Image (spheres, rainbow, N blue to C red):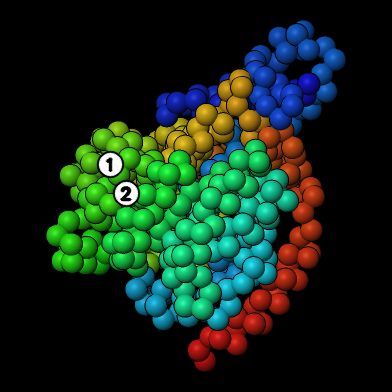
Amino acid sequence: MQLISAPWILPVTSPQGGVLTEHCIAMQGGRIVDVLPLGQAHRQHPEAECEHLERCALLPALVNAHTHAAMTLLRGVAEDLPLDAWLNERIWPIESACLSREYVADGTRLAIAEMLLGGTGCFADMYFHPDVILEVAADCGARAQVGIPVLDIPGAWSCSDAFEQAEEVRSLCTRAPLLSAALAPHAVYSLSLDDLRRTGEQARALDLRVHIHLAETRQEVDGCLSEHGVSPAVLVDRLMPEVPLQGAHGVHLDDDDCTLLAVRGAGIAHCPASNMKLASGFCNLARLEAHGIAFGIGTDGCASNNRLDSFAEMRLAALLAKSVSEDPAFMDAHRTLHAATLGGAQVLGLDGETGSLEAGKSADFIAVDLSDIASAPLYDIAGQLIYACGRNQVDSVWIAGARKVRSGELVDIDLEDIRARAQSWQQRIGELLPG
């Protein structure tokens, strides 16, 4: 039994939140036994190993609800472009030339290191060679939903590859307690109706969730209306019925779309930085909330962000939501923290396992050091975490009770090797860039 205590604990069991003082997390066998007053814990567990983290707040490990982890290797290769040009003129040509198992392994390991250091303990990925991704995630001890990408990249990956590997990837995930699988069709504009329909059929047959870019841009919505006479949300609903659905972005969902998505229990991963950088628009979180749609917060990939920084995304999500809704009380600090933890877990279908500090759940939590000069003075802990803290203040990270970050340093991941591999890819990819 271990007792981890700190001056403040934020369990995040509801959107309203709350802060506990003089409490601790009792954990054993990788799971939370209880969150209870410190004195009571010492009386009940006198032989427990105890650790007190002074000036820290304990909260659930953050959930990155949508990313493309291996695209860390494309950080900065396609700046200041709209999505269509970003994909067709830069990203997809580079991937056609470079995509390999080595590329995916090195990029994913770089991403996981960055996310762990920033307090992210769980991520929903969508990228090629998913068997490599789950291998790296398992080796690093990260929690991941591995999206099996349905998309054609000439000479590198095909929709057929996805369909052929889906059952194997799902099987591998069932043997790895921190991993789960989803089918990840890229988008309605990049796939045929047959491929979208087949994705739905296979998801139902294998009992997999579907993770898809949905209503990300006005161009996507207008194109779908012009070609198919319905919005992307309606098209996805028709072609992939009766499967758990998680949409990335959801920027251009109207009320009819939201009604439809709410009925089928779909969730949305809100990616504010990426949407702003690509000028895609602003996701209307107030509309999602009004319709009862679960939403989490994602970073998207490094090629369009350029950081896997969930603290930065939380702050941006809160500020944007207030601006879009013209309501300063909307997306308060506790609600925002919920979106970045339990809300994200709900979108991924993992809320029974992670996202909050409750007895029976996996011991996935972080300690944030509030002794930083930018955190003084301290009046509102939740407000401080959302509006003032940075990922540099993450002191410790536990996933399933295993400590992955201690005193701001990775415990068992070779950061120098990761840097060296990233430098090697920089040289190779740099030769493909214009100019």
Mark 1, residues whose alpha carbon is within 10 Å: few (<14), some, or many (≥20)?
many
What kind of element bears circle 2?
loop
Residue displayed at 71% across by 50% down: 140
Is residue 17 shown above or below 415? above
Q: What residue is disc 1 on?
A: 261
Q: Is residue 156 left or right of residue 42?
A: left
Residue 379 horizontal/vertical position (percent) = 53, 31
What is the x, y in percent for residue 70? Answer: 58, 63
Residue drawn at 61 percent across, 22 percent down: 360
Q: Nearer the viewer, residue 350 or 14?
A: 350
Q: Is residue 405 left or right of residue 312?
A: right
Q: CA distance from mark 2 to mark 1?
A: 12 Å
- Say which residue label 2 marks: 240
Residue found at x 41% / y 74%: 86
Which image quadrant: the N terminus? top right
Determine crowd level at label 2: few under 14, some 14-19, many 20+ residues with C-alpha closer than 10 A.
many
| Label 2 or label 1, whichever comes before in sequence order | 2
Report the amino acid beneath label 1. Leu
As displayed, is residue 342 above or below residue 186? Answer: above
In the figure, 290 relative to 433: above or below?
A: above
Residue 181 seen:
yes
Judge by depth and name the residue closer to the eye, 23 or 88: 88
Q: Quadrant of residue 229?
A: bottom left
Label 2 sits on what residue type?
Met
Q: Residue furthest bottom?
A: 435
